[in-house]
Amino acid sequence: MRLCPNCNEWYDEKVGDVCPNCAYKYTKEDRVSVFTANDIKSVIKERVTRRNNPWIIALVALINLAVILSIIDIFVSKVCWSVYPLILFIVGFAVARLVYCRHDGNAVMRKIRAYLMILSLTLIFYSLVIKYASKVGQDISFFIVYLLPLTYIAYIIATLVRFMLKGMGKANVIWTMASIIGVCLLLMILGITVFSAKGFALALCIIPVALSVLVAINLGLVSYIKLKKNIEKIMSQTIDNDVIDVETED
C-alpha cells in the first residue's frame, strides 16, 4: 500500500505513480521517501524475526541448561554425569541446524566447524574438571585423545574431498585449516601433558595439527606461486605492448 501525500488516502502501489483518488502524480522525491519507509519496515521485520528465531531460542536454552547442569555437577554431585546429556543436546542441535541449511554446502561446512569447536571446548572443560575435581576417579580423557582427534581428521579429509571436487576454493580451505589449528593444538598439548597420551593415542593427538598445518601451508604456497606467475605474465604482456608501441612509432 502507498499513502498519497496530496489527499492522504491509501491505495495499492501496483496501480502506479498516479493516485487513483486525486490523480496526484508522484515525484522522484516521493518515490525515494516511500522506498525508504518500506526499507525501514523490512529492516524492523527482519530484526524482530531474527530476535524470535527458533534456532537462537534453542541455543540460549541449551547454554542455560549447560550452565545449570555444570553447577549442579561440579558442586553437588559426586559423579560428573552432565557431560553425556550435554553432548547429546549439542549434537542434536547441530544435526537439526545442518539439516535445515543442507542446500548451502559452504554454510554447512562453516556450521560443522563452529559446532565442532563448541563441542571440543565443552569436552575439554569437562575433561579437566573431571580429572581434577571428580570424587570417584572418573576419566573421560578418551574424548580428548581419541574421539575429538578422529573427528577433526575426518573433517579435514572431508574438506580436502570437497576441494578436489571443486566444491571449495583454495582461500576457503586455507581459512578452514587455519581456524581449526588452534583447537587441534590445544587438544595435542592437553593429550600429551595432562592426559599422558602414548602410542596410538599420542599419534591421534598430533595428526590433526600436522594435517591442518600442512594443508594450509601447501595450498598457501600453491596460491602464491600461481599469483606470482599471473603477475609475471601481466608484466610480460605490458612490456611486449610497450615494445610494439615503440616500434610502431618508429
Image: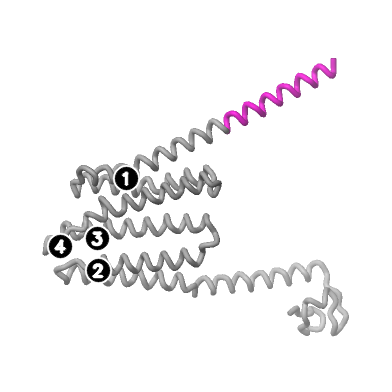
Amino acid identity at mark 3: Tyr
x then y, percent, for residue 90: 36, 65
Residue occupied by mark 1: 185
Q: Quadrant of residue 121?
A: bottom left
The disc label shown at residue 134, or none: 4
SS state under label 4: loop
Q: Distance between the residues labelled 2 and 1?
A: 26 Å
Q: Distance between the residues labelled 3 and 1?
A: 18 Å
Amino acid identity at mark 1: Leu
Do the CB atoms of the residues marked 2 and 3 lie less than 8 Å apart? yes
Q: From which residue to which does the magenta span run?
A: 227-250
Is 230 displayed left or right of 110 in the figure?
right
Q: Distance between the residues labelled 4 and 2?
A: 12 Å
Identity of the residue drawn at 34% across and 49% down? 183
x then y, percent, for residue 72: 22, 72
Of 27 and 184, nearer the camera is 184
Of 193 and 102, nearer the camera is 102
Quadrant showing the N terminus: bottom right
Q: Which of marks 2 and 3 is nearer the N terminus?
A: 2
Quadrant showing the C terminus: top right
x then y, percent, for residue 132: 16, 57
Q: Is residue 122 shown in magenta?
A: no
Residue occupied by mark 2: 82
SS state under label 1: helix
Q: Quadrant of residue 129?
A: bottom left
Do the CB atoms of the residues marked 3 and 4 lie less than 8 Å apart? no
Furthest residue to the right?
23
